[in-house]
Image (cartoon, rainbow, N blue to C red):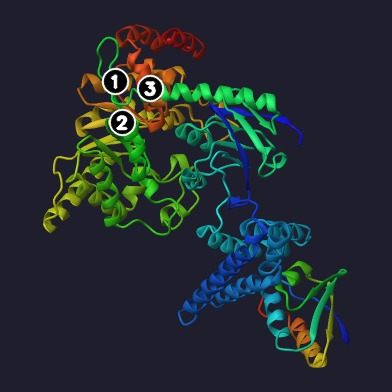
C-alpha cells in the first residue's frame, strides 16, 4: 500500500492513529463498512425488512388519506412511491450489491441510488429529470429505517481506534457519533469554526478539516495518522513514521494522566482568587464526564439536545426526568439549564416555526424568540425545569435576549408556569434563579436593564463574536474573519464582565473561549471568576488557573482593552501567557 | 408480438404518475409489455425504468407486447397513451 500525506487545517490538536471509516456524503450520512461472507444473508434480510416496513408505512399513509377530504393526487403520489419501492431496481439490486461487495445494506442502497440518480441526470427534459427526487425520497425512507436499526455494527478492534472520514458533518450527525468514540475526525470541507471542529475540540479528539478530497483518496479500513497539531494526515504510514507517532502519542497521554491528579484540587490563582470551573453538558449522560473532571457545577445544560435525533417533542415528564437526573447527580451544586436554543444551525423537523426557511436564520426566529412564539412548548419546558428545581440547585438560563420586553415576557411566562404548578400542588423552588445569556452586542451595551431583572448572566462567546463581527462561522468563505481577539470583542467582553461585577450580579462565560487555556489569563484579567466549558477542558484550564496571577493579568488586560489592532492584542496576549 | 408507435401528446411527457398508470395497467395482462424510446428500452412492469425512458412531450414511443393476450394489452396501453395519460399533472 502506498503511503501518502494529506494536508488540511488542523482544528483540534493531538494525535490519533487508527483505521479509516468512510461516511458517504449523501443527504443522509451513510456508513460504509465491510461484512464477512457469513453476515451476507443476515444483511440482506435486514435490507428486506426495512423495505417491508416502508411498504407498510406507505400503505398506512395511503389508507389514512382515503376517506378524508384529501385531494386524489396525494394518493396517486403515494402510489408512485409504493411502486418505486417495489421496483426491483430499488428493492432487489441492493441485495445483489451486498452479496457481491460484502458491504452493509445502507451502503449498497446508497450506491444503487447513486447509479439511478446519475441516469436521471442525463435526461434532457428538466421536468422528467427532476423525477429523480421521487426515487431519492423512497430510497431515503428505506435508509432511515435501516439506520434506525443498526444490525452489524462496524467492526472495531479494541486495540485500534476508528477515524471518521466524511465529506462534511452536520450537528445531527455529530450527536450520533458521540457514542461511537471515534479517535479522530477528517473532513473534506469545513474550517476552524465548522461544527466538526467545535465538536472535535469539545470531545478532545484530533481533527483535520478542509482536506478537499480525503473522502475520495482514502479507502475504508486504511491505517491513518491524524496529526491535528501539524495539520497533516498520513495514510498507510511506514514503520518508522508509525513508531515516531506512537511515541508522540504516549507523551501526550502521560501529560493527560498528570492532569487527572488535579481533579479534587480547588481552582485558585496564585494571588488567591477562587474560580468556579463548571461544565457544559448536552444530555444527562454527560454528567459522569463532568464529575470525573472535577466540575463544581453545570454552567450550561443545552436542553435543546433533548430534541435532536428523535421523533416528536419530549413531553413534560420526559424533560422533568432528564433535568431531575442532572440536579440529583450534582448533589446541591448549581445546575444551570438553558431553555431551548433551537433554530439557525440546529434544525428540528416537525416544529412548524422552524420548518420554514428563514431568509437569515441567525437573525431570525430562534432561541428565546422561538420559545416566546411557541408558548405551549415554552410553558411545558418551564414547568419541567421548575419541577426539577425541587430536587437540587437548579437555575434557569434564557438564551439570546436582546431587549427588555423579551425578559419581561419570559418572566411572565415563568410566573404563569409557577401558578399552574401551585394550583396542582406540585412542589418547586419558588426562588429559582433566572439568568440571561449575553450573546448579542445590544445586551452588553444596554446591560443595566438586564441587571435589574435577572439574577445572573452568562456570556455565550460564540454567538457574541458572530453577531459583533457579522460573520457566520459555519460559512467557509468568511470564517477566517471570525476572530475572538478582535478589539471590539475584547472591549465588549471586558465591558460585560466589568458592569456585572460592579453591580454584584454573578457573570460567567460559557462559550468556547472559556475552555481555551490560551485565553484563561485574559478572562481572569477581565475579572471573570466563573468559567463553564466542555468537561474535557476542565483540568487543563484548572492547571492554568493554578499557575496564574489574576492581579498581574489585570494590568496587561487593561492595555489589551485599549489596543486598536488585532496584531497588538495578539502581542499582549503572548506577553500575558509567557 | 405486436408493435405500435405512439406519439406522446401529454404536455409533461411520460411523467411519474403516467408511468405509474402504465405499470398498473400492464400488470393486468399476462404478456410482456415493453416501451422503447430513443433506443432505450423499459419493461412496463418496472416504474423506475419507465421514468428513465424520459418520453418527453412530442417524442415517439414504440410499444411492444408479446404473449398470450398481446392484442388486448396493446389496445389498452395505446388507448391510455392516446388518452393523454389522464388529467394534466
Please tell me whether mark 1 sits on a helix, a strand or a loop.
loop
For the residues labelled 2 and 1, the Cα–Cα distance comes to 10 Å
In terms of depth relative to the viewer, which is nearer, A171 or A175?
A: A175
- In the picture of the structure, the residue carrying the numbered disc 3 is A541
Subunit bearing disc 1:
A
Answer with the quarter of the image where residue A9 lies.
top right
- In the picture of the structure, the residue carrying the numbered disc 1 is A267
Residue A295 got which mark? 2
In terms of depth relative to the viewer, which is nearer, B13 or A489?
A: A489
Q: Residue at x 34, y 17 (%)?
A: A545
Same chain check for tags 1 and 3: yes
Judge whether residue B54 can be spotted in this image: no
- Quarter occupied by the C terminus of chain A: top left
- In the displayed structure, A110 sits above or below A520; it is below
Residue A566 horizontal/vertical position (percent)? 50, 14
- Quarter occupied by the N terminus of chain A: top right
Residue A37 horizontal/vertical position (percent)? 67, 59
Residue A390 horizontal/vertical position (percent)? 16, 46
**Lower sequence index among marks 3 and 2:** 2
Residue A170 shown left or right of residue A104 in the figure: left
* Other-residue count near label 2 (Cα within 10 Å), few / some / many at <14 / 14–19 / ≥20: many
**Lower sequence index among marks 1 and 3:** 1
- In the displayed structure, A384 sits above or below A474; it is below
Amino acid at each position: 500500500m502506498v503511503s501518502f500525506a494529506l494536508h488540511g487545517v488542523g482544528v483540534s490538536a493531538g494525535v490519533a492513529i487508527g483505521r479509516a471509516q468512510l461516511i458517504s456524503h449523501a443527504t443522509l450520512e451513510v456508513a460504509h463498512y465491510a461484512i464477512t461472507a457469513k453476515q451476507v444473508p443476515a444483511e440482506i434480510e435486514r435490507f428486506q425488512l426495512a423495505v417491508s416496513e416502508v411498504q407498510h408505512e406507505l400503505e398506512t399513509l395511503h389508507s389514512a388519506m382515503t376517506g378524508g377530504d384529501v385531494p386524489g393526487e396525494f394518493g396517486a403520489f403515494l402510489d408512485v412511491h409504493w411502486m418505486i419501492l417495489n421496483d426491483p431496481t430499488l428493492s432487489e439490486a441492493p441485495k445483489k450489491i451486498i452479496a457481491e461487495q460484502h458491504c452493509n445494506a445502507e451502503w449498497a442502497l446508497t450506491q444503487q441510488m447513486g447509479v439511478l440518480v446519475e441516469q436521471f441526470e442525463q435526461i434532457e427534459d428538466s421536468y422528467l429529470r427532476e423525477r429523480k427526487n421521487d426515487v431519492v425520497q423512497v430510497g431515503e425512507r428505506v435508509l432511515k429505517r435501516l439506520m434506525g436499526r443498526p444490525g452489524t455494527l462496524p467492526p472495531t478492534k479494541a486495540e485500534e481506534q476508528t477515524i471518521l472520514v466524511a465529506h462534511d458533518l452536520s450537528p445531527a450527525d455529530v450527536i450520533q457519533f458521540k457514542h461511537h468514540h471515534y479517535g479522530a475526525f477528517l473532513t473534506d470541507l469545513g474550517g476552524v469554526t465548522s461544527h466538526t471542529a467545535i465538536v472535535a475540540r469539545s470531545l478532545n479528539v484530533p481533527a483535520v478539516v478542509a482536506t478537499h478530497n480525503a473522502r475520495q483518496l482514502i479507502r475504508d479500513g486504511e491505517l491513518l495518522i491524524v496529526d491535528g497539531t501539524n495539520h497533516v494526515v498520513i495514510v498507510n504510514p511506514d514503520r518508522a513514521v508509525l513508531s515516531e507517532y506512537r511515541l508522540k502519542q504516549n507523551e501526550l497521554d502521560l501529560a493527560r494522566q498528570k492532569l487527572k491528579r488535579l481533579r479534587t484540587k480547588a481552582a485558585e490563582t496564585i494571588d488567591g482568587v477562587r474560580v468556579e470551573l463548571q461544565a457544559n453538558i448536552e444530555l444527562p449522560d454527560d454528567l459522569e464526564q463532568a464529575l470525573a473532571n472535577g466540575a463544581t457545577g453545570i454552567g450550561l445544560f443545552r436542553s435543546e439536545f433533548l430534541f435532536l435525533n428523535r421523533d416528536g417533542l419530549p413531553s413534560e415528564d420526559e424533560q422533568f426526568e432528564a433535568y431531575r437526573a442532572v440536579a440529583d447527580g450534582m448533589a446541591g451544586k448549581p445546575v444551570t439549564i438553558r431553555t431551548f436554543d433551537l433554530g439557525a444551525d440546529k434544525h428540528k423537523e416537525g416544529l412548524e416555526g422552524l420548518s420554514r426557511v428563514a431568509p437569515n436564520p441567525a437573525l431570525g426566529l430562534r432561541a428565546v424568540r422561538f420559545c416566546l412564539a411557541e408558548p405551549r412548548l415554552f410553558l411545558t419546558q418551564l414547568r419541567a425545569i421548575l419541577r426539577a428545581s425541587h430536587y437540587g440547585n437548579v437555575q434557569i438560563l434564557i438564551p439570546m435576549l436582546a431587549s427588555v420586553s423579551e425578559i419581561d415576557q419570559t418572566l411572565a411566562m415563568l410566573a404563569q408556569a409557577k401558578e399552574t404548578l401551585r394550583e396542582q400542588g406540585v412542589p418547586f423552588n419558588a426562588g429559582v434563579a433566572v439568568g440571561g445569556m449575553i450573546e448579542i452586542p445590544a445586551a452588553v451595551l444596554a446591560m443595566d436593564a438586564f441587571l435589574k431583572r435577572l439574577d445572573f448572566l452568562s456570556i455565550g462567546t460564540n454567538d457574541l463574536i458572530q453577531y459583533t463581527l457579522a460573520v457566520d462561522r459555519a460559512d467557509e468563505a468568511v470564517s477566517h474573519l471570525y476572530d475572538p481577539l478582535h478589539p471590539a470583542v475584547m472591549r465588549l467582553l471586558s465591558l460585560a464582565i466589568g458592569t456585572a461585577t460592579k453591580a454584584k450580579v454573578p457573570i460567567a462565560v460559557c462559550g468556547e473561549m472559556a475552555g481555551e487555556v490560551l485565553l484563561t489569563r485574559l478572562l481572569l484579567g477581565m475579572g471573570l471568576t466563573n468559567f463553564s466549558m466542555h468537561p474535557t477542558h476542565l483540568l487543563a484550564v484548572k492547571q492554568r488557573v493554578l499557575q496564574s496571577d489574576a492581579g498581574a493579568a489585570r494590568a496587561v488586560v487593561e492595555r489589551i482593552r485599549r489596543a486598536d489592532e488585532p496584531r497588538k492584542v495578539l502581542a499582549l496576549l503572548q506577553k500575558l501567557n509567557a | 408480438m405486436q408493435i405500435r408507435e405512439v406519439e406522446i401528446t401529454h404536455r409533461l411527457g411520460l411523467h411519474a404518475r403516467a408511468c405509474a398508470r402504465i405499470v398498473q395497467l400492464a400488470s393486468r395482462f399476462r404478456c410482456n409489455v415493453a416501451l422503447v424510446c430513443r433506443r432505450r428500452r423499459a419493461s412496463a412492469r418496472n416504474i423506475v425504468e419507465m421514468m428513465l425512458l424520459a418520453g418527453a412531450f412530442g417524442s415517439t414511443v414504440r410499444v411492444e407486447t408479446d404473449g398470450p393476450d398481446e392484442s388486448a394489452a396493446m389496445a389498452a396501453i395505446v388507448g391510455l397513451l392516446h388518452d393523454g395519460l389522464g388529467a394534466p399533472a
